[in-house]
Image: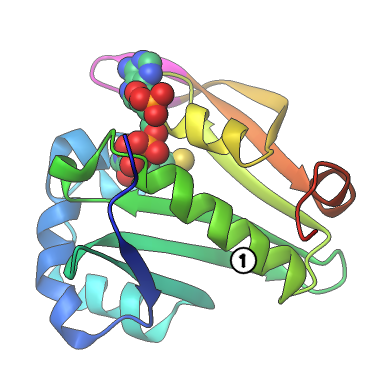
Amino acid sequence: MACPPFVLRPPRYEDVIPYTHFLADPEVSIWLDDSAQRPLSVARVEAILLREAWCLWSIDCDGAFAGVTSFYEPDPSRRTARYSIVIGDRRRWGQGLGTAVIRQVVEHGFSQLNLHKIESDILEHDKGALVIHERAGFVEEGRLRQDAWRRGEWVDRLLFSNLHDEWREGGGGS
Ligand SMILES: CC(C)(COP(=O)(O)OP(=O)(O)OC[C@H]1O[C@@H](n2cnc3c(N)ncnc32)[C@H](O)[C@@H]1OP(=O)(O)O)[C@@H](O)C(=O)NCCC(=O)NCCS
């Protein structure tokens, strides 16, 4: 399926309420950090989107706000940052949007932010996230065993990374 048209743009105040609703959807939040496993206040979401982010974009798809993607926890000495993506509008899942967004943000991270390594972690059953990370060149480099409690069981957290050298050798930036 062709990916629907999308743009990455700076977050706006109008995104705060819809993003709060997205994060309150258990089908979305289950894949996120422990801090998202209880409802987040509008004030907290406002801080996340508009005040605390290092490098964060809102995703507009077909002209409507659909989610957020970001780099966070930059480490200038290692030239690393962590990657995250949340497409909160579940009607958009499975249309190629996540794949297109992660590829564009990885390209930006290596070519514009001069990152050496992009890190990401994924809960083991999050198949959609695993697929898009692998398509964008991420490689599994470790596993934190029984690292999160979700829906009555412990689940492993997989550590993924993408290296600038490998991305370039794979044709990125050419
Ligand atoms: C992960 C996420 C970004 C993926 O976005 P998306 O727009 O659905 O991604 P895409 O459509 O580009 O690709 C997803 C692929 O995974 C596949 N997939 C999804 N669930 C799957 C499953 N249970 N088993 C096998 N494949 C699965 C889809 O079929 C699709 O592959 P296809 O293109 O061959 O059909 C989105 O689901 C999301 O935001 N989820 C909630 C938050 C989250 O998990 N964030 C990541 C935390 S690391």
Q: Regarding mark 1 in the picture, which secondary structure is present there?
A: strand
Image location of residue 104, percent across then percent down: 55, 60
Image location of residue 170, percent across then percent down: 81, 41
Image location of residue 154, percent across then percent down: 40, 16
* Image side of residue 99 versus residue 145, left or right: left
Q: Residue furthest top?
A: 153
| Magenta span: chief secondary structure | strand
Task: Name the residue located 46 percent from the left edge and 50 percent from the top edge.
Answer: 100
Q: Is residue 105 above or below residue 44?
A: above
Amino acid of disc 1 = Glu
Q: Is residue 7 above or below residue 61?
A: below
Residue at image mark 1:
73
Q: Which residues are magenta?
A: 148-155
Q: Look at the image and tell me in which quarter the N terminus lies.
A: top left
Q: Quadrant of residue 159?
A: top right
Q: Look at the image and tell me in which quarter the C terminus lies.
A: bottom right
Closest to the observer: 145 or 77?
A: 77
User: How many numbered dots are placed on residues in this image?
Assistant: 1
